[in-house]
Image (cartoon, rainbow, N blue to C red):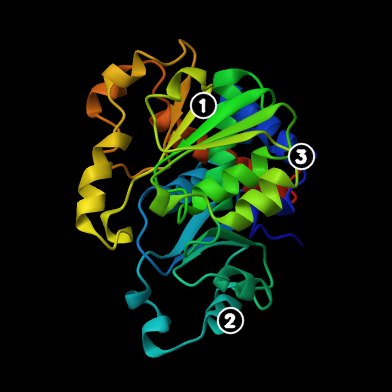
Amino acid sequence: MRNLIDIMQLSVEELDELIHTALDIVEKPDKYAECCKRKKLATLFFEPSTRTRLSFEAAMLELGGSVLGFSDAGTSSAAKGESVADTVRVVGCYADIIAMRHPKEGAPLVATRTAGVPVINAGDGGHNHPTQTLADLLTIYREMGRLNNLTIGFCGDLKFGRTVHSLISAMSRYSGIRFVLISPEELKVPDYMISDVIEKNNIPYEITTGLEDSISKLDILYMTRVQKERFFNEADYLRLKDSYVLTPEKMKKAKEKMAVLHPLPRVNEISVAVDEDPRACYFKQVLNGKYMRMALILKLLEVKI
């Protein structure tokens, strides 16, 4: 029995296999419509989520399975003080697979020890969000036709962004990758990501504070929100916040085939005027997330097509 807690648990070959399955689902949805008949997915969301929870539920329903669970810990026995270990042990008696989001880092890993069924980490604090990375990988592949030989720019909050760290780790295993890391000094990529992932894999990288100066060299621009609450000094936030707003004016400097990704929700870091640009891929990313979650559910349940 396998779980997915961290994207690095999947080999490059397994990532390629999931992408192949997801593309087949896109092409032949009817072939997969009853693959999980009589199977149940439990969504245990101890903190709020819209996209991720609904994406998992839509994925299981489109595979012919059913869904149970909760979207608010206050409506579960956690409100009475029940431990995560006990909650998942009980839910594992009802469901065939569990998708779990929790504010505490490591909680889904704890869940794997007692669940008795596969557990998927749907986000644990600032730590991991592996299925968002699967959505990112499928989006890059569908837009670029490859996952190698790409210059990827990450822009915004690179210090606390779990989606950024996961995608850097995943892409570091492909050849010909180059990273451009665009952020305020206060929100730079953590040193351990530079030393343990980027430099360890001999990946060329550049650290900069300027989006406009870098955008022309990018194949992928991965936007994130610059969060006011991360700054000790409001003056610094006000000085920097508009530097990282993507506008049609800035897009004029980008490659014709560049793809803009964002894990959502956005606030103001991408102008709504950019939504009509064919290079805006963040809503496609949402749909790709559903397909990759379908592929992952099939893999972890060992469903043979």
SS type, badge 3: helix
State the residue at coordinates (37%, 56%): 49
Q: Which image quarter: residue 69?
A: bottom left
Comparing labels 2 and 1, the label whose residue is closer to the camera: 1
Of label 2 and label 3, which has the lower sequence position? 3
State the residue at coordinates (35%, 62%): 48
Picture coordinates of residue 39, whole percent (x, y):
61, 56
Q: Which residue is mark 3?
A: 12
As drawn, which residue projects farthest toward the bottom? Answer: 81
Q: Between 284 and 6, which is closer to the camera in this rendering? A: 6
Mark 2 belongs to which amino acid? Answer: Ala
Q: From the viewer's perspective, is 187 left or right of 297?
A: left
Picture coordinates of residue 63, whole percent (x, y):
57, 42
SS type, badge 2: helix
Task: Relative to 48, say whether 111 is above or below.
Answer: below
Q: Are marks 2 and 1 in contact (CB under 8 Å)?
A: no
Q: Which residue is mark 1?
A: 220
Q: From the viewer's perspective, is 25 left or right of 249?
A: right
